[in-house]
Image (cartoon, rainbow, N blue to C red):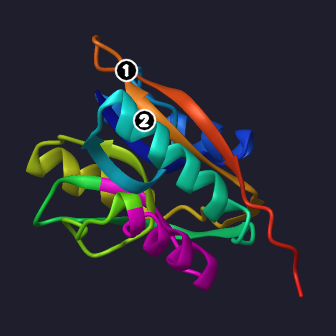
Amino acid sequence: MRYGIVLFPAKKLQDLANSYRKRYDPHYALIPPHLTLKTPFEASDEEIKAISKELRRSARELRPVQLEVTKISSFSPVNNVIYLKVEPTEELKELHSMLHSGALESEPEYAFVPHITIGQKLSDAEMADVLGQLKMQDNHHSEQIDRFHLLYQLENGAWTVYETFILEKEEI
């Protein structure tokens, strides 16, 4: 089965992201707005049990994550993706790193650029037009997130939560 690991922002930020995703993201109906921590990977039932156990243990050792959205940006010209840029805080980088070690040991396909996708698979002309309009808007947002989610993909391509992990380490 195919799995992935994400952070879901609070409803206010999800509503903002969805206001754009309805028009500009063909994956709108498949998954809520999210920040990908680990791209999709394959695992058997036995492997996912071991991975879940390790994620539970690791989550107890990590602090909640501060999510700071600072602007709208894109991966253009490499990829026609528009996103809400999330600042790479130490807690966020630590969580991402943990999810690429141990039972989940892997080399990330791309450098970690924390973001929440709001548009993708746009034509070059549409990309330039939409990005130009969105960059003029102020989209600052800040919140603390105390959990991350292991998702699995359904046969229709949609993603659903397999397990949620609470980040429990106390502030010093």
What element does badge 1 sit on? loop
Q: Is residue 158 left or right of residue 85?
A: left
Residue 28 position by quadrant: top left
Q: Residue at x 33, y 44 (%)?
A: 119
Residue 74 position by quadrant: bottom left
Q: Is residue 97 magenta?
A: yes
- Mark toward the viewer: 2 or 1: 1
Tell me: residue 26, above or below residue 53: above
Tell me: residue 11, above or below residue 131: above
Q: Residue at x 39, y 70 (%)?
A: 101
> Which residue corresponds to mark 2?
21
> Which residue corresponds to mark 1?
158
Real-space Cα separation, disc 2 to disc 1, in angstroms: 15 Å
Q: Marks 1 and 2: in contact by CB < 8 Å?
A: no
What element does badge 2 sit on? helix
Q: Is residue 102 left or right of residue 52?
A: left
The residue type indicated by label 2 comes to: Arg
Q: Position of residue 128 (x, y in %)?
A: 21, 57
The residue at the far top in this view is: 156
Tell me: residue 155, above or below residue 115: above
In the picture, the quarter occupied by the C terminus is bottom right
